[in-house]
C-alpha cells in the first residue's frame, strides 16, 4: 500500500456537491448493459460495486471509461470482487484489503480518495450456513471492519463506508423476520456489530432520511420475492460526521431490480451538498495516515 499521506494529500480539500452510490452488481460483465444504463440515467459521481465476479483483466474497464468513469478494481473469480468508479476522475488507491488478517486474500474491500472524500467499497461476508466456519469468518471480518472504521473515524476526514454489508440491521429492514430466523443476515452478532459501527458515529444515510419507511435493497431470486416485494435492506452507505453534515438526500433505485436480467440487488445512493470553504487557506500537505492501534 502506498503511503496514504502522499496518495491523498491534494485530494482532501473541500469536496464538491456529489452523489455517491453502492451496488452489488452480481457479475459486472453479465450486468454491464444494465450498469451502463444506470450510470447514464442516475449520473452518480462515485460508485462502489460489489460481487463483480471478474478478475482485474476481465473487468470491462474500456466500456466504463467510455461512459465517463475511471475505475479502481480489486477483482476475483468466481465470487467476490469489488470496485470503485469515479465520474470524470480516477480514484486514488489507499488500500486494497481490510487490515487485520494478512492471510485473508478474498477481494472484499477497496479504499480510495475521490474528490476530497475517502470511499470504501465493502462486500462483507454472507456467513451462511450458520453456525459454521463461514459464519465465524463473517464475525471476524466484522471485528476487523470495526477496528479500521474506528481509525477512519478518528482521522476526522470525510469518509463513506459503502457496500453490501450482508446485515439487515433491524426487523424493520426485512419484509418478514420470521422466515429468515436461521439466516446469517439476521443473527444477533452481526446486528450487534452494525450497531457498534453506528455507535462510533457513523450515520446510516438511507435510514436517516427514511426513518420509518419499509425500504429494501435486496430481493432474493427465489420464491417470487421481487414480485411480492419481499425484500431486505442489506446495502448501506455509512458516513462520518463531515459527510453527514452535508447529507441532502438518500434512497434506492429499486426499479433496477425489476429489469430483465437484473442483479438481485438495487443501487442505494446518497447526495451531498458542497462543503463550506474555510476562511484560512488549506495546508500544503495533509497527513491522513491512520494512527497505530495496539491490542
Image (cartoon, grey):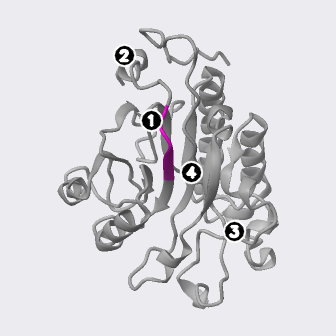
Q: Earlier in the sequence, mark 2 or mark 3?
A: 2
User: What residue is disc 4 on?
Assistant: 271
Between 63 and 230, the residue placed more toward the observer is 63
Q: Secondary structure at mark 3?
A: loop
User: What residue is disc 3 on?
Assistant: 183
Q: Is residue 253 in the magenta section?
A: no
Q: Residue at x 68, y 19 (%)?
A: 295
User: What residue is disc 2 on?
Assistant: 6
Q: Residue at x 57, y 26 (%)?
A: 157
Mark 4 is surrounded, within 10 Å at the Cα level, by few (under 14), some (14 to 19) or many (20 or more) other residues, namely many
Mark 3 is surrounded, within 10 Å at the Cα level, by few (under 14), some (14 to 19) or many (20 or more) other residues, namely some
The quadrant in which residue 200 appears is top right
Marks 2 and 3: CB-CB under 8 Å? no
Question: Label 2 to label 1, Cα distance in Å?
Answer: 27 Å
Q: Which of the two discs, 4 and 2, sits closer to the camera?
A: 4
Question: Label 3 to label 4, Cα distance in Å?
Answer: 32 Å
Amino acid at each position: 500500500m502506498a503511503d496514504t499521506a502522499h496518495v491523498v494529500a491534494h485530494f482532501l480539500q473541500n469536496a464538491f456537491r456529489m452523489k455517491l452510490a453502492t451496488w452489488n452488481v452480481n457479475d459486472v460483465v453479465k450486468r454491464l448493459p444494465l450498469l451502463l444504463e444506470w450510470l447514464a440515467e442516475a449520473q452518480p459521481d462515485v460508485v462502489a460495486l460489489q460481487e463483480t465476479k471478474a478478475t482485474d483483466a476481465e473487468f470491462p474497464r474500456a466500456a466504463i471509461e467510455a461512459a465517463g468513469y475511471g475505475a479502481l478494481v480489486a477483482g476475483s473469480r468466481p465470487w467476490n470482487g469489488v470496485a470503485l468508479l469515479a465520474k470524470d476522475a480516477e480514484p486514488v488507491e489507499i488500500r486494497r484489503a481490510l487490515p487485520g488478517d494478512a492471510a485473508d486474500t478474498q477481494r472484499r474491500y477497496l479504499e480510495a480518495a475521490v474528490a476530497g472524500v475517502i470511499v470504501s467499497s465493502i462486500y462483507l461476508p454472507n456467513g451462511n450456513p450458520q453456525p459454521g466456519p463461514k459464519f465465524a469468518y463473517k464475525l471476524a471480518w466484522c471485528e476487523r471492519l470495526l477496528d479500521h472504521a474506528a481509525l477512519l473515524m478518528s482521522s476526522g476526514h470525510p469518509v463513506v463506508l459503502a457496500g453490501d454489508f450482508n446485515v439487515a440491521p433491524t426487523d424493520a429492514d426485512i419484509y418478514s423476520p420470521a422466515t429468515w430466523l436461521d439466516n446469517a443476515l439476521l443473527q444477533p452478532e452481526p446486528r450487534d456489530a452494525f450497531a457498534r459501527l453506528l455507535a462510533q458515529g457513523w450515520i446510516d444515510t438511507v435510514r436517516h432520511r427514511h426513518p420509518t419507511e419499509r425500504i429494501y435493497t435486496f430481493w432474493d431470486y427465489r420464491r417470487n420475492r421481487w414480485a411480492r416485494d419481499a425484500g431486505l435492506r442489506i446495502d448501506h452507505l455509512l458516513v462520518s460526521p463531515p459527510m453527514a453534515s452535508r447529507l441532502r438526500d438518500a434512497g434506492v433505485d429499486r426499479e433496477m431490480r425489476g429489469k430483465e436480467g437484473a442483479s438481485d440487488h438495487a443501487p442505494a445512493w446518497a447526495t451531498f451538498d458542497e462543503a463550506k470553504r474555510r476562511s484560512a487557506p488549506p495546508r500544503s500537505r495533509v497527513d491522513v495516515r491512520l494512527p497505530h492501534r495496539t491490542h
